[in-house]
Amino acid sequence: MSEDINAKLVASKQKWAKDGRLLTGTTSRPEEQRLPPGQKLVTNWPVLDLGIQPDVSKDVWRLTIDGLVENPLVWDWNEFQQQPAFDDVSDIHCVTQWSRYDNHWQGVATRHVVELVSPLPAANHIIMHSYDGYTTNVKLEHFADVDCLIAHSHDGEPISREHGGPARLIIPKWYLWKSPKWIKRIEFVDADKPGFWEVRGYHNEGDPWLEQRYVA
Ligand SMILES: Nc1nc2c(c(=O)[nH]1)N[C@H]1C(S)=C(S)[C@@H](COP(=O)(O)O)O[C@H]1N2
Ligand SMILES: [Mo]
């Protein structure tokens, strides 16, 4: 991890986790409700990260997909663009309490990635690594969900550098810390490994409907 991460910001978020801030104690998903418990709707799009926003131009960008797979691969930007296009509209929910509805994402479906690389039977989790040193972990089945993608565009515009451009993951069913910006490597593994926030008190999964913000 780079040393220029914003240590103060990390420490204060870690304290929030420890104190269980923002928890409302909700444990079910009401059918009619769109806004998860404890969230507030926003129409802007806040920026949250470790304080480093790597400048990854498309000509140096590479995405490595490896680990326990039959066909590991490295894409440059052109190869990434040549993959079947996928687009989807989803809501985003950040653990710091804001939600934003109807985000239109365009990119490449994670299901397509899984089909291409062909995971070995032992692979059961995904570790995602970013250009700023950030990592986060999800189960393979969650990574491969129908609404997940490696996105290059948001609401019709290329994803800006501050929001993780040129490409970031989008895993809409989890809080947004599970959606790494500036994606660099997608690693298939046979044992779960908590990522940056998961070792600092955040929940290992992160379902907004179950308020899986922090570990109790
Ligand atoms: N590479 C990277 N991805 C990251 C982060 C980060 O620090 N680095 N922060 C996470 C967190 S905690 C949040 S809430 C979202 C914020 O995404 P946004 O800035 O586009 O709103 O990015 C997630 N992905
Ligand atoms: Mo976050």
Image (cartoon, rainbow, N blue to C red):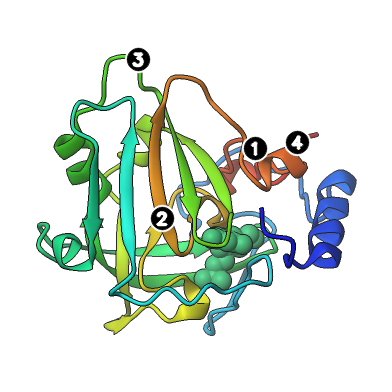
Q: Amino acid at mark 2?
A: Lys
Q: Eyeballing the image, is 13 above or below 199? A: below
The residue lying at 43 percent from left, 19 percent from top is 190
Q: Is residue 146 visible?
A: yes
Q: Secondary structure at mark 1?
A: loop
Badge 3: residue crowd in 10 Å (few <14, some 14–19, many ≥20): few
Instruction: State the separation of the CA atoms marked 4 and 1.
Output: 14 Å
Give 26 or 67, whichever is nearer the viewer: 67
Number of the label disc, if any, that sits on residue 27: 1
Give 167 or 14, whichever is nearer the viewer: 167
Ranked by sequence position, the earlier of labels 2 and 3 is 3
Instruction: Please name which of the two marks, 4 or 3, marks the residue nearer to the observer.
Output: 3
Instruction: Please name which of the two marks, 3 or 1, marks the residue nearer to the observer.
Output: 3
The residue lying at 46 percent from left, 70 percent from top is 164
Q: Which residue is mark 3?
A: 122
Q: Are marks 3 and 1 in contact (CB under 8 Å)?
A: no
Q: Which residue is mark 4?
A: 215
Q: Which residue is mark 2?
A: 184
